[in-house]
């Protein structure tokens, strides 16, 4: 009898922990939410920063940036639901460019809604 009581108490404790806080295991997973944060020009390249703000019930598979006619894909991401990331572009010609962050999980790929523009100055 005592053994059954212990099993019941453990089961209740497990359910209590599983149902508290931000547990989303009962929800359907969906594609991540991503933001383009900033672009910092450094000579003839640019340091781009972005953030994944949510990736419910699906681990991140990759993050990166699309800029100009190129893409920077970063695949080393953690399993957390929110993730700050950054990357530096290859050397660019003088001109005006755009950058937008993207993130991908097991459900799909999302492109950020904020596009950032930056300008590489001409050499003197």
Image (cartoon, rainbow, N blue to C red):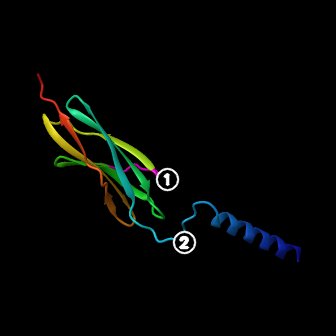
Sequence-first disc among 1 and 2: 2
How packed mark 2 is, by other alpha carbons closer than 10 Å (few <14, some 14-19, many 20 or more), is few
Residue denoted by label 1: 80
- Write the residue at 12% across / 25% down: 123
Image check: 117 left or right of 80? left
Splitting the image into 4 quarters, where does residue 10 fall? bottom right
Q: Name the image quarter holding the C terminus.
A: top left
Q: In which quadrant of the rendered view does residue 55 lie?
A: bottom left
Main SS, magenta region, reads loop
| Most distant residue in the top direction | 124
Residue 25 picture location, percent across and down: 54, 68
Query: x, y (%) of residue 114?
Result: 29, 50
The percent coordinates of residue 65 (x first, y second) are 28, 48
Residue 6 belongs to the span the image colors magenta: no
User: Which residue: 78% across, 73% down?
Assistant: 8
Q: Which corner quadrant holds the N terminus?
A: bottom right
Please tell me the numbered disc located at residue 26: 2
Residue found at the very far right of the displayed protein: 1
Q: Which residues are magenta?
A: 74-82
SS label for mark 2: loop
Tell whether label 2 touches label 1 (CB within 8 Å). no
Q: Is residue 3 left or right of residue 16?
A: right
* In front: label 1 or label 2: 2
Would residue 120 be found to the left or right of residue 100 on screen?
A: left
């Amino acid at each position: 009898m005592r053994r059954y009581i212990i099993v019941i108490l453990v089961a209740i404790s497990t359910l209590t922990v599983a149902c508290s806080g931000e547990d989303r295991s009962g929800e359907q997973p969906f594609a991540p939410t991503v933001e383009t944060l900033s672009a910092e020009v450094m000579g003839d390249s640019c340091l781009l920063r972005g953030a994944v703000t949510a990736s419910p019930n699906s681990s991140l598979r990759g993050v990166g940036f699309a800029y100009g006619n190129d893409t920077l894909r970063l695949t080393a991401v953690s399993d957390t639901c929110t993730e700050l990331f950054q990357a530096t572009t290859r050397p660019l010609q003088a001109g005006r460019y755009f950058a937008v962050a993207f993130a991908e999980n097991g459900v799909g790929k999302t492109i950020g809604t904020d596009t950032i523009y930056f300008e590489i100055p001409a050499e003197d």
